[in-house]
Amino acid sequence: MKQVLRKGFTKVVVEDIPAPRPTSGKVIIQTAFSLISPGTEMADLHPDGVIKEAAANPSHFSKIFEVAKKTGPVAAFRELRAKFSDYSVIGYSGSGTIIDVGPGISDLKIGQRVAYGGEGTGHGEFVSVGRNLVARIPDSVSLEQATFSTLGSIALNAIRLGKVGIGDHVAVIGLGLVGQLIAQLATASGAVCTVIDILSDRIDLAKRLGAAFAILPSSDLNASVDSITSGRGFDRVFIAAATESPLPLRQAISISRERGSLILVGDCPIDVSRDEMYAKELRLIVSRAYGPGSYDKHYENDGIDYPFSLVRWTENRNMEEVLRLIEAGRLRVDDLITHRFKVDDAESAYRAIIDKSIKSLAIILEYSPRGSDTIVSGKVNTTCCDEQNLPGNQSETGLGVAVFGAGNLAKWAHLPAIIKTKKTNLIAIGSNNGARAMSYAKRFRALYATTDEDTILNDPSVNSVIISTRNSDHARLALKSLDAGKHVLVEKPMAIKIEDCRLIEDAVNRNGKKLCVGFNRRFAPSYRKMKETMRRFRGPFLITATIASPGIDKTWAVEESEGGVFLSEACHFIDLFYWLIGSEPTKVYATSSDNKNIIGVLEFEDGSRASLLYTTFGSSKSVGEQLEVFSADARLYARNFKEFSVVGAGAGKYSTWFPQKGYNEQFEAFIDYTKGLRSECATAKDGTRATLGCLLILRSAQLAKELPFDEGQL
């Protein structure tokens, strides 16, 4: 399908990418029209915006430095360079017809006309949208008019926050697209609306659309305000200007009445003194997005609505109300459209925004003949090939590899490992995010990208897959891949439920295929040296591991559906303890104040003991891991994949400038494993042990008692 993308930082391109597939709680929409948001999207694309963003946020440079420290300057430079060609989805407002409905949605049907919104939906021929960001279009509202539902909701949310009422004197500073919509909505709410802008043509448009008064750039501001408001000032002032100057906000203060309200909608700095606000006892409100539900992933992604009786106006209900106002003729959007472009000519559309000499306001992208409600027939193309791409490495062995998941771990670890070896061909990259799958396919030279996992599983040229998706998909994809006759390298945890672990073990035995779990520490040089050294000493051993992951509790890994952060991270160390000691665990005991900060102790058959302190506390500078092993003869120490030392018998030290995490070595071992050669790869049984250990530690902390290492305790 065709998708408008930002390539790098400032370039707009139209590319063929895989179309989305229906997932739980989402619908697939065939787009008819989409609306370019001139404020947000111009800021994302303008070259000055990139420079100013970097200059205003030194943290961007510190992030690059931190990446260089973790991966080395060569990898950091490679990643920075790739940013100039990576794809990003832009756009968030459109309309079309539902062509598919994912599980969990019962009130939307194929064939219905709908408006949609939401970050990441973008300008594409097909979009995947969560239920709460989709609104049915009334029969008398055209698909083109319905594209204003999202931006109209931004304006409507500001009106609601400002509590605009009948007879209020309202001023709107800045008559871009959102400012024009606010002005109309204020008038529709019974307010007396005055518009202010430096562009006379926009003032003329606002007056035609119902604004009662206008203040021209050449006017005496104070005299005009006194004349309009009988010397009292405005009850509500909306700042809808996008500017780096604090002048619009200061202007709003000067024209407001005492105890009035200032509602900031545009991207305008808040650079005013307390005295200015105090003198009039003003209230400043910063309006955010479309209304309640914005930035709440449970609302936007999971489709969990807020109770109607408690939250009357949500994002979705605001979208519906905007469509009702358009239907009733109280919100006129046709006159706001200045340009229309075919989606193939999207680059010209964005030039019309950036070029100040082109007087643009609302710009519509068209995907089908005007007025057509025709639903696409036939199967949507979920796979894209780049004819210029060749496999990253030609291999006579014929070992074809595909990767499920296009996240950071795939980008930083698995895909570079595939490219580095000369034993495989990278056939495909599969992801729900078609733009990212295509971006990675081009970057790492895969034969094709797809959003359809079955395309990969049915491809006879693929005999091995790497599963690098979110945790909740690991077991399902591993089972499907094994049953499809593929060898599997699955990221940790192998599964988040012990029942799924057992199913995977059975599938390995049933299909005769190899499965390796991504416990890369088995291949990291510092830990390999630790294991080799331990063989020289007498057990039992005492091991203590400290793992600090501040910030991870703000990621998807914290979600219960993904197993939580402890299972996601600590399973590495359950496996590491077993691998280092070479003995099965027999008991666990743990204590915790929550499921994210835990101290756990494991006992092993040979008498060894290992303690694990896992925490999400600390600063970003405290991120890392350290592990100590004590025997009767020595103390062994490893830290952050860079250091290993021995104190006592056989004293010595090993260190590297940059972390060596073992991903390349792990992939080489996986290839050998698929050929039946001896390998240190973690097996399905090892994956089960690690998941079980984490679940038992969580259970022990919950019960505050020691538990035998037995799944019957769960």
Image (cartoon, rainbow, N blue to C red):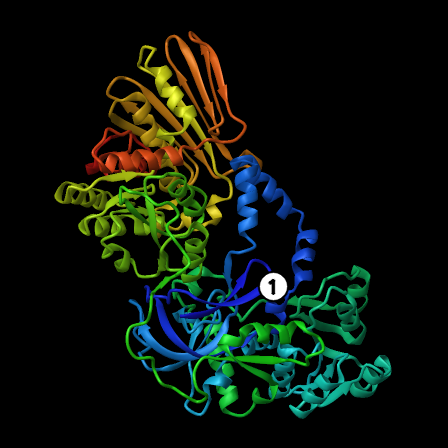
Q: Nearer the viewer, residue 73 or 645?
A: 73
The reply, left or right, for residue 83 in relation to residue 130 is right
Q: Is 406 rendered above or below residue 522?
A: below
Q: Is 126 rendered above or below residue 322?
A: above
Q: Is 8 rendered above or below residue 143?
A: above
Is residue 97 in view?
yes
Q: Position of residue 572 (x, y in %)?
A: 36, 34
Mark 1 nearby-residue class (10 Å; few <14, some 14–19, many ≥20): some
> Disc count in the image?
1
SS for tag 1?
Answer: helix
Is residue 700 in view?
no
Residue at position x 49%, y 33% in the image: 624
Occupied quadrant, residue 153: bottom right
Amino acid type assigned to the residue bearing label 1 in the image: Asp
The reply, left or right, for residue 41 in relation to residue 407 is right
Quadrant including the C terminus: top left
Q: Is 560 rendered above or below residue 627?
A: below
Q: Position of residue 38 (x, y in %)?
A: 61, 73
Extreme-left residue of the structure: 510
The reply, left or right, for residue 648 in relation to residue 177 is left
Quadrant including the N terminus: bottom left
Q: Position of residue 56 (x, y in %)?
A: 69, 53
Read off the residue under disc 1. 44
Q: Where is residue 159 in the image (x, y as percent from the top left)?
A: 61, 77
Q: Nearer the viewer, residue 171 or 282?
A: 171
Q: Nearer the viewer, residue 221 or 505?
A: 505
Occupied quadrant, residue 509: top left
